[in-house]
Image (spheres, rainbow, N blue to C red):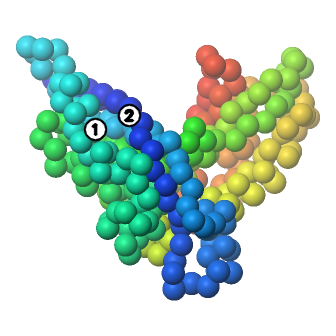
Amino acid sequence: MASVLLNKRIEFAASHRYIKPEWDEAKNRAVFGPCYNPPAHGHNYMLEVTVAGEIDPVNGMVVNLFDLKRVLLDVLEEFDHKNLNLDMPYFKDRIPTSENFARLLWTKLAPQPDIGALHTVRLYEDEDLYAEVTATGGLDRASVTRRYSFTAVHDGNQGHSWDLYVTVHGPIDPVTGMVTDIAAMDRLVLDHVVKTFDRQDLRQVIGTQSVSGSAVAKTIWDRLTGRLSSGTLSNIHLDQTRDLSFDYAG
């Protein structure tokens, strides 16, 4: 029987700060930007866990949802409403970035016998940023996805908002705890995509008489690939409307 994937989401709150005590303030600010600001900043995190398994022929489930929720609540109770830097020994010598936090949660969840085979751990800091660790990628690598928005005219129709999700994959830096420099990525996307596309007719930007969402996604890929400070561009996801989206991965 084929394996089935099951997703479960659960929320919790915690605060953190990006800081290397051995670095001076100038270097901390240059590398971590606003995430360095004292004393700490909080997030309403969303943890999305994907488990894999075969459907039980008796109960029709991959895993018992009650057991899955209980395990997630038990694991997250340790972190809920805590300062990750000050209260959690796991981050004594490790920066509590989303990538490091997602990796830690994986190590907590993977041994649990009641949730099946762990497939993916996705941790949202907010609706615009999440980190993801997968079984296939291993614990030393992660993906980071950032959401951006712009308004543009499509094929002469009235302009509407597009949501752009840029995903970068790579090793988690053992010093910074990051896959890529988010501030640098923000500047890159702003300069090469948002400023160029926002409030424009996409036919003129791309230079064609007719523009499809897939062509827009590919154009964004071409503008960003090879320009990241670290990590590798792995996916462009573009929401044209609530009901229509496009992905491009080179």
| Residue pictured at 85% horizontal, 23% vertical | 159
- Does residue 47 lie above or below 26 as drawn? above
Along the viewing direction, whichever of 78 and 233 lies nearer the viewer: 78
Q: Amino acid at mark 2?
A: Ile
**Label located before the other in sequence (2 or 1):** 2
In the picture provided, is 213 more to the left or to the right than 71? right
Q: How many marks?
A: 2
The kind of residue on which mark 1 rests is: Leu
223 shown above or below 230? above
Residue at x 34%, y 63% (from the top left corner): 88
Q: Which quarter of the figure is the C terminus placed in?
A: top right
Residue situated in front as seen by the camera: 171 or 115: 115
- Judged left or right of residue 132, residue 59 is left
Q: Quadrant of residue 90?
A: bottom left
In the rendered image of this protein, does residue 55 appear above or below residue 24? above
Residue at the left extreme, as displayed = 58
For the residue carrying disc 1, how many other residues have a C-alpha within 10 Å: few (<14), some (14-19), or many (20+)? some
Q: Is residue 249 visible?
A: no
**Toward the viewer: 209 or 205?**
205
Q: Is residue 146 left or right of residue 91?
A: right
Residue denoted by label 1: 73
- The percent position of residue 46, horizontal first and vertical second, equals 45, 39
Q: Nearer the viewer, residue 2 or 139?
A: 139
Tell me whether circle 2 and circle 1 mark residues in contact (CB < 8 Å): yes
Q: Position of residue 164 (x, y in %)?
A: 67, 38
Helix, strand or loop status at disc 2: strand
For label 2, the residue is 10
Task: Judge the density around disc 2: few (<14), some (14-19), many (≥20) Cα neighbours within 10 Å.
Answer: some
Instruction: Give x and y (percent) for residue 188.
Output: 74, 57
Question: Could you tell me how far apart the alpha carbons at marks 2 and 1 are, in whole angstroms?
Answer: 8 Å
Residue occupying the point 73% across, 30% down: 162
* Residue 115, x across and y down, in percent: 19, 36
